[in-house]
């Protein structure tokens, strides 16, 4: 069976974990290159030991590699700023890009929500780890009742946040907030990230708050079922993704001020939906507490697998 060759730019935590996923369990993909800028990085060393072509000269080194023409999909696991440069060099060469940074040059993709909508896009953006974990829940609530406002809080272990994550905190919140609205369907979205320094490190925890208009109690049961179905859909490609407790739906008191959270001319919501999630990593390369990285690499891999399968007619 012919496989689609892929390259990964970024030999840090995310890129190395993604490489191992491709090598161990991909159905339609084959590693064509691992690209970094630090010749001493563990990711490049591991790639070399596993027989994957490597370069420490960044995107220019990738373009110069023998076999570059055979590579069809390039994952970018660098930083938002670096992706702008990489995309400018690779898109004119006909490469399909899967962006695991918050650069958001291309359309946002959250596999459980809108994977099939952007399979022809030359550069798709995987939002952020917090977005991949929480936007499916916002969308699940929204398909039952309009979401006037959605707020997510992503708490990750400080040890799992590498230099790329730390350098892109502003982009993380901006990109996630925008995707909550564009993909999740909320009329207004807000995102918060917390780097938790606890020892031993805690697994990724995500909290989703949605303000909805749902006065009918029967609708509450529909919302719970919709969220549970969506959690199962995400868990199909991120096995460590799960609800921590039952979905909570509470009435908003008449004297509770929510006007500053709502978009202009929005209806006053009747209820708050609270969803608490945990993401345990598969520990392919990093410890299980690094679920924030696992959900990103798993989501990116899901997109590439679908692109490659469609190309092969499967």
Image (cartoon, grey):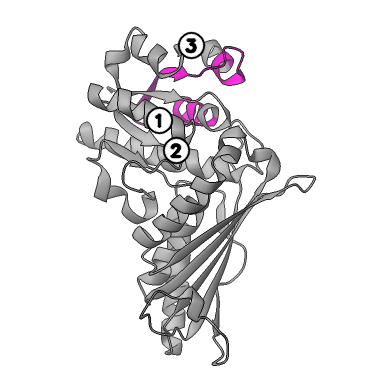
Residue at image position (43%, 25%) is 8
Q: Position of residue 192 (x, y in %)?
A: 57, 57
Is disc 2 in contact with disc 1, using a CB cutoff of under 8 Å? yes
Q: Is residue 89 left or right of residue 312?
A: right
Q: Is residue 310 left or right of residue 148?
A: left
Q: Where the N terminus falls, by quadrant?
A: top left
Residue 75, numbered label: 1
Q: Which residue is mark 2?
A: 100
Marks 2/1: CA distance? 7 Å
Residues 27 and 194: in front is 194
Residue 105, numbered label: none
Marks 2/3: CA distance? 24 Å
Residues packed near mark 3 inside 10 Å, few (<14), some (14 to 19) or many (20 plus) = few
Question: In the rendered structure, which disc, 2 or 1, sits on the residue that comes first in sequence?
Answer: 1
Res 302 → quadrant? top left
Residues 294 and 105: in front is 105
Q: Secondary structure at mark 1?
A: strand
Q: Is residue 46 magenta?
A: no
Q: Which residue is mark 3?
A: 51
Q: Is residue 216 left or right of residue 251?
A: left
Q: Is residue 22 magenta?
A: yes
Residue at image position (68%, 46%) is 157
Is disc 1 in contact with disc 3, using a CB cutoff of under 8 Å? no
Res 75 → quadrant? top left
Question: In the rendered structure, which disc, 1 or 3, sits on the residue that comes first in sequence?
Answer: 3
Residue 125 showing in the rendered view: yes
Q: Is residue 195 above or below residue 282?
A: below
Residues packed near mark 2 inside 10 Å, few (<14), some (14 to 19) or many (20 plus) = many
Residue at image position (58%, 14%) is 45
Q: Position of residue 191 (x, y in %)?
A: 52, 58
Q: Where the C terminus falls, by quadrant?
A: top left
């Amino acid at each position: 069976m012919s496989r689609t060759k892929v390259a990964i730019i970024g030999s840090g935590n995310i890129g190395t974990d993604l490489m191992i996923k491709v090598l161990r369990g991909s159905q339609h993909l084959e590693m064509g290159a691992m690209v970094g800028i630090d010749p001493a990085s563990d990711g490049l060393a591991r790639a070399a030991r596993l027989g994957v072509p490597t370069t420490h000269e960044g995107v220019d080194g990738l373009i110069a590699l023998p076999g570059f023409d055979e590579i069809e999909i390039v994952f970018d696991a660098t930083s938002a700023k670096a992706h702008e440069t990489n995309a400018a060099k690779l898109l004119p060469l006909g490469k399909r890009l899967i962006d695991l940074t918050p650069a958001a040059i291309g359309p946002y993709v959250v596999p459980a929500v809108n994977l099939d909508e952007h399979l022809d896009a030359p550069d798709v953006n995987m939002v952020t780890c917090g977005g991949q974990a929480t936007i499916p829940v916002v969308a699940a609530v929204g398909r039952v009742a309009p979401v006037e406002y959605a707020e997510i809080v992503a708490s990750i272990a400080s040890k799992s946040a590498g230099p790329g994550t730390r350098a892109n905190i502003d982009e993380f919140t901006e990109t996630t907030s925008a995707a909550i609205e564009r993909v999740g369907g909320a009329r207004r979205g807000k995102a918060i990230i917390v780097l938790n320094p606890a020892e031993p490190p805690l697994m990724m925890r995500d909290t989703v708050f949605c303000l909805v208009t749902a006065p009918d109690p029967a609708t509450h049961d529909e919302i719970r079922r919709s969220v549970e179905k969506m959690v199962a859909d995400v868990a199909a490609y991120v096995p460590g993704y799960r609800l921590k407790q039952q979905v909570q739906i509470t009435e908003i008191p008449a004297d509770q001020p929510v006007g500053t959270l709502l978009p202009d001319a929005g209806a006053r919501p009747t209820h708050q939906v609270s969803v608490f999630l945990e993401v345990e990593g598969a520990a392919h390369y990093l410890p299980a507490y690094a679920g924030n990285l696992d959900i990103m690499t798993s989501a990116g891999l899901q997109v590439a697998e679908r692109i490659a399968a469609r190309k092969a007619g499967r």
